[in-house]
């Protein structure tokens, strides 16, 4: 029976990852980080960011616990590092230095911070690792894999058509969105760092 596709697990993974990655909320951040790129470069960045997130989450789903154990890294440390990285990017966006973030024609932006830790953050990684643990047989693992791919397909569609939003907002509107994105990113970063500290305290106690 475990060989059958686990529809319930698929829906759980799909909905959970969508809530964590929040595709609509990623659009203003994506626009802010790719404001200086051309339309073609923005499309490449959207595709690469989605593929990077897929690769990172899939890798941690399969080898995550072994990787963290081998490197003696806790999930709290991973979360704290991601928060510090996001805070650095957020400060650049807030003070108008996003051009430094957008260097290398979108390559670095697609990898970091878009692919990880914005999309493939600690929350998405941990949720997928837990789903793999709950999977039962081939059908369960297939359900997790399909749920992950489906969620990132939705993310890619949102980023893919973010260019239309850019055309609608024009340069002045995009600049405003960039500042808002910096504020949102800074809040996300602080929350990630706070959660990391809380986890460290709970572990120590």
Image (tube, rainbow, N blue to C red):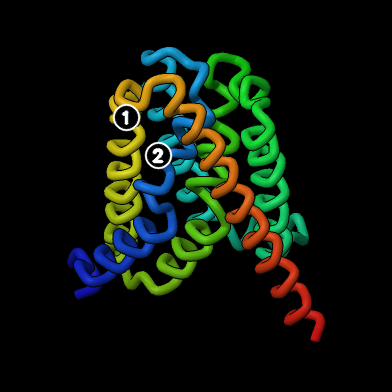
The residue pinned by badge 2 equals 27
Distance of label 1 from label 2 (alpha carbons): 9 Å
Horizontal side of 182 relative to 38 (left or right) equals right
Horizontal side of 177 relative to 43 (left or right) equals right
94 or 164, nearer to the observer: 94
Quadrant of residue 71 within the rendered picture: bottom right
Point 20% across, 64% down: residue: 5
Q: Quadrant of the N terminus?
A: bottom left
The image shows residue 29, relative to residue 23, as above or below, that is above
Confirm or deny contact between disc 1 and disc 2 (CB under 8 A): yes
Between marks 1 and 2 in the image, the one whose residue lies nearer the viewer: 1
Horizontal side of 116 relative to 68 (left or right) equals left
- The 10 Å Cα crowd at callout 2, few under 14, some 14 to 19, many 20 or more, is many
7 or 178, nearer to the observer: 178
Residue placed furthest toward the bottom: 205
The image shows residue 139, relative to residue 161, as above or below, that is below
Horizontal side of 180 relative to 157 (left or right) equals right
97 or 203, nearer to the observer: 97
- The 10 Å Cα crowd at callout 1, few under 14, some 14 to 19, many 20 or more, is some
Return the x and y of residue 83 as percentages of the image width and height. 67, 52
Return the x and y of residue 13 as percentages of the image width and height. 34, 63
Q: Quadrant of the C terminus?
A: bottom right
Point 47% across, 69% down: residue: 130
Which numbered circle lies on residue 165? Answer: 1
């Amino acid at each position: 029976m475990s060989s059958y596709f686990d529809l319930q697990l698929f829906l759980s993974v799909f909905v959970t990852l969508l809530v964590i990655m929040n595709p609509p909320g990623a659009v203003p951040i994506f626009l802010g980080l790719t404001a200086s790129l051309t339309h073609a470069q923005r499309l490449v960045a959207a595709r690469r960011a989605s593929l990077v997130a897929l690769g990172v989450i899939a890798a941690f789903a399969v080898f995550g616990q072994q990787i963290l154990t081998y490197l003696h890294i806790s999930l709290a440390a991973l979360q704290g590092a991601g928060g510090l990285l996001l805070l650095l990017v957020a400060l650049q966006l807030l003070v108008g230095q996003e051009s430094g973030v957008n260097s290398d024609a979108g390559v670095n932006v697609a990898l970091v911070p878009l692919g990880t830790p914005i999309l493939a953050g600690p929350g998405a990684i941990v949720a997928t690792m837990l789903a793999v643990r709950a999977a039962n047989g081939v059908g369960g693992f297939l359900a997790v894999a399909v749920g992950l791919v489906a969620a990132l397909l939705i993310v890619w569609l949102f980023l893919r058509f973010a260019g239309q939003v850019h055309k609608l907002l024009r340069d002045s509107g995009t600049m405003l969105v960039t500042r808002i994105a910096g504020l949102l990113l800074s809040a996300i970063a602080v929350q990630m760092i706070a959660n990391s500290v809380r986890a460290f305290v709970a572990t120590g106690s």
